[in-house]
Amino acid sequence: MNKRKITKVIIAVILPVVAVGYLLYQTAESSWVYYYSVDEFTGRLSAEDADAFCCNGGNCLVRLAGKVKEGSVSVNQEKMQLDFELAGETSLLPVRYFGTVPKNFASGREVVAEGKLGENKVFLADNILTRCESKYKVKLNNRGSEVEQ
């Protein structure tokens, strides 16, 4: 084989491998979602410019975990709009969601909000997931010892 044929074979093998690798990376990257607690998220907001947050100028999906602050829930049935504050250990973040309110959604409940940071640092949720308390928690009697279930 001469040098020219070897070069063509190498290009014919490497080019498809690189193209497939690039397509796999792009597909995976579009489905990545950053997961933060409310405190981590608000801490990063105060340390960075909100427009440059996380990726693509702040234009990426983020999942935030926290508790719905007591007394902060406001529902507008006509607009199908839900507003509430998501609480961490030390910080609060206002959240706005348009859609059907999840069945188990309530004040004081742990939720995960998936969406993007909007104007005025209001988190615009595309999806709200309620966390259910485990039915497998250990029950204690009044003396502090485990009770069989």
Image (spheres, helix red, strand yellow):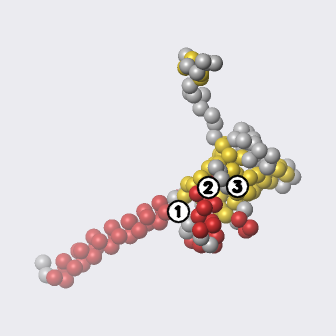
Instruction: Say which quarter of the image contains residue 142.
Output: top right
Residue at image position (68%, 46%) is 67
Disc 3 secondary structure class: strand
* Residue located beneath label 2 in the image: 39
Height in image: 17 above or below 114? Answer: below
Where is mark 3, residue-wise? 92
Give the residue type at disc 2: Asp
Sequence-first disc among 2 and 1: 1
Q: Secondary structure at mark 1?
A: helix
| Residue at the limit of the structure toward the right, as seen here | 78
Going by the picture, which residue comes out furthest to the top? 148
Q: Are marks 1 and 3 in contact (CB under 8 Å)?
A: no
Which amino acid type is marked by label 3?
Leu
Label disc, if present, on residue 30 of the rendered structure? 1
Gap in angstroms between the C-alphas marked 1 and 3: 28 Å
Front disc: 2 or 1: 2
